[in-house]
Image (cartoon, coloured by chain):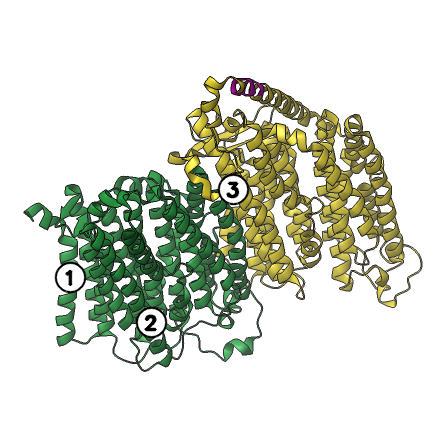
Amino acid sequence: MENVSFPYLSLVTFAPLVGAAILLFMNRENQTAMRWVALITMLADLAISLFAYAAFDSTSATMQLRESHVWVREWGISYKMGIDGISLFLILLTTLLGPIVILASWEDIRLRVKEFLVCLLVLQTGMIGVFVALDVFLFYVFWEVMLIPMYLLIGVWGNPARKLYAAIKFVLYTIVGSLLMLVAILTLYYMAGNATGTYTFDLLKLYEFPVPLQAQFWMFLAFFLAFAIKVPMFPFHTWLPDAHTEAPTVGSVVLAAVLLKMGTYGFVRYAIPLFPNAAVDAAWWVCLLAVIGIIYGAWVAMVQDDVKRLVAFSSVSHLGFVMLGMFAFTTQGVQGSILQMINHGLSTGALFLIVGMIYERRHTRLISEFGGLSKVMPLFAIFFMIVTLSSIGLPGLNGFIGEFLILLGAFRVYPWYAVIAASGVIFAAVYMLWMFQRVMFGQVTNAKNLGLKDMSSREVAVLLPIVVFIVWIGVYPNTFLQPMEPAVKNFIRQVETKRTAILSLEKAKKEAVADPASSVKLTASWPTSRQSGGEKQEAR
Amino acid sequence: MNAVQLFALTPLIVLSASSVVLMLLIAFSRRHVTVAFMTAAGLLATFLCLPAVYPDLPQQVTPLIVLDGYAVFFIGLTLAAAFALVLISYPYLQNRPGRPEEYYLLLLLASLGAAVVAASSHFAAFYIGLEILSVSLYAMIAYERWSLMRLEAGVKYLILAAVSSAFLLFGIALIYAQFGSMEFSAIAARAAEGGITALVGSAMVLVGVGFKLALAPFHMWTADVYEGAPPPVTAYIATVSKGAVFALLLRYVNQYDVLASPQVLLVLTAVAVASMVVGNLLALMQNNVKRILAYSSIAHLGYLLVALVAGGALALTVVSYYLVAYFVTTIAAFGVIAVLSTSERDAAPIDDYRGLAWRRPWLAGVFTAMLLSLAGIPLTAGFIGKFYVVASGVSSALWLLVATLAITSVIGLFYYLRLVAAMFEQVETHATAAREEPVGSFAATAVLAVLTLLLVVLGAYPAPFIRLIAATVSF
């Protein structure tokens, strides 16, 4: 056993599950009690994650708070968890949103409250599990398990008209990618096992295995599909607007704030470090897709007449930034990309909460139905304004820091992409401010809007913590950037060293092939992925 | 045959004896509960013989039967499945008109047939076992002979099973004509000779086996028979009958290195791809839960074929594990159908399941778990099974099969999710009130609870079970 610590991570991961188990045996008539149990569970989870944060050494780049237990010895599967500066803040984001989401659903969801809360808690476990897993098998289990509660959240509590369509579309899109990823994981498992003699799903051990170039291409492709669908990158994004529009408010919040991050996190933790050569070779194309996503998402957001759909398409645009920064492979770019994941979680999460608040009052989300709300709901207008500006990337708020770092990082490698992406920031200002203007300013044209109540204290409690962090990151980002830095630098170094190591290895191989004596052994070392089923005998 | 060999045969002897005892018992007492209890006791007694004989194995008993760890494992699986189905059948038959006692007799005989098939090392034993199994099944399907639907299903199964038996028999005859033997080992020893007669014979045997396993393109009967038969019997056909035949196929393929021949490999690959594609695509268009499960079973047998084609030492463990997962899942799924069926009709239309999660949350929970297992979602036995199959496919670099499996699984997920969605749908209360809701019985509830627990344990912590398989399953 390696240095195993107090099981913070297991506690963070499974505390919501305990709450779900308690809920299962509660009387379904007593809704308020169930909500309190869920809220307290989420708060406890947040507290545990803060303890984990306190125990985290922010100067070190290694995986910390590790836990490791044998799970299935025969297959080399272990229950292995650990975090570094990259996953730390994603976990904190998830646990921060936990209680917020429960509070936000307090009055919104009145039907089947028990099942709803159970779904949310199970989902929380699955999402945190994805961020803490250091075993590929464990990761895959969490990755898939969290599909089911999300499916139910959309499919049961969603918008009646098209909820099933949206829910099934969400699951099918995700599963296409993840099944291909499963095949790639197993290929990697056997390839590494055949070469080294130890068959393991341990991510840190798999990091050390140099994957042959051609195999890297195919495996990266499979991982790329799985994660790109989740992110979602253009052109795999079409499930997102549907899922967001049909999901209940808190479903959208969780989906935007955390679930999408699982895709980007997957790139940082799995796809890129495992297959560095393929990732670097593909970077130009990935960045191209990212830039297309930035512009396309912004343009489509501009013409939406439904606020929620507008926010959904803005996600496509924002996540394009995240991907651009990551695939620039510079310290600023990657750091900005990870910070932007958090930023997007906060501001888009808040935007969906705000949209939910209007929807609860008016039961419509059409921009044309509103106008002049700032006169009726001044407090609401303040919150909405801050969040909108954060989403646009106004200096002094969080969005600016992330986008600035990303553009800085990307400019050094792909100046043209950075220039085009920067125009995405302007488009973002256009669609967000235009929407804000139409909804909040001007005269109250619709009589129904006259009697709207301003935010209740519960709603303030929902948005306030998010706004605090929006300002905090904007004013003093070092609290967040500093713990990230060692891990990010380590990530870039790791990618670079492994990439060059594999390149020289391949070069040595090519020279060996030129020398016929040793060529037989090397070509037979692994069947290339291009073979199809019928040609099995060669493989044997 | 010496005493040790005879002793090795104890499980089969006890199972046959229990059938006779049961028959005599029915002559004297027609109490349903006694008969069901005796059946369960007979199955349990046979099961308990297995660990007793295990230390002396493997034993070749006459040229016909071989009892090795592999056979014991599949006999044990058959018995466990039959035991669970007795407990599910009891409340089901209790609710329905007619005399239920002989049903149990047929169930015991069918299990005997399946056990013989799993342990056969000779075409004669295989054929006899298969016929015991099939003939019992004809009667079990059409047991409620006043129901037209049951009769239709029974006759369909009779005719198609008879045709497939004819193929099988003709194939065996051709093989015998060339090699002068029906022992698997003797045939395998001379298989390298080739020859058109034996090739045609093997093809015909494969057709026969394909019928029994409902592999595409021999799958036509499946949906109709699944739909027409009583749910416990459908579960029996889906699990025990197919499991035994698949066990034999694996024994034959693996022990005698049939995969060395490229033609066989090509045919098996084609059949596997066809089964996965056809099963999953046709299931999309169904509105009847039993038919959906029928097509899904075609696809699942296709997945199993992937592991079989991958071959090697891994195939034994993979197929054993997958079959156990498939047995648990299928029996529980049909168990839910049986529990929901009323005295008038089976709960087959998808409409019967709308809103089930709100009316009977635990039952819906069990069914959801089973569907997710069939779809291969983690933390269920089905996931480990699928994971294992993909692993064996990848380790043998069968990219075509693995890709087909991955893509068709996505299609599969769609129709499983449709069922889940139906269960979680909001329905008007008057629509549900129109239908009488049957009450669950203790026996069926207990079986479902145990199977669900097993499903999760096998899915979350498979290590001990994998060790058990690795220790037992060998030739």
- Nearer the observer, B158 or A532: A532
Percent position (x, y) of residue A436? 86, 51
Label of residue B16 in the image: 1
The letter of the yellow chain is: A
Measured in 3D between alpha carbons, the distance from the residue under mark 2 to the one under mark 1, in whole angstroms, is 25 Å
Q: Quadrant of residue B392?
A: top left
Main secondary structure of the magenta stretch: helix
Q: Is residue A416 visible?
A: yes
Instruction: Looking at the picture, tell me which residue is in the foreground, A203 or A522.
Output: A522
Residue A399, given in percent of the width and then of the height, sits at: 79, 38
Calculate the distance from the C-alpha at mark 1 to the C-alpha at mark 3.
46 Å
Q: Which mark is residue B92?
A: 2
Please identify the residue farthest to the left as the structure is shown: B2
| The C terminus of chain B - image quarter | top left
Q: Which residue is mark 3?
A: A182
Amino acid type at circle 2 is: Tyr
Chain identity of mark 3: A
Using the image, name the chain to which the residue with label 1 belongs.
B
Tag 1 secondary structure: helix
Residue at horizontal 72 percent and vertical 25 percent from the top:
A331
Q: Which residues, given as a range, are shown in magenta?
A: A507-513
Going by the image, does A393 lie left or right of A167?
A: right
For label 2, count other residues whose C-alpha is less than 10 Å away and answer few (under 14), some (14-19) or many (20+): many
Tell me which chain appears green: B
- Residue A29: x percent and y percent? 55, 64
Judged left or right of residue B71, residue B152 is right
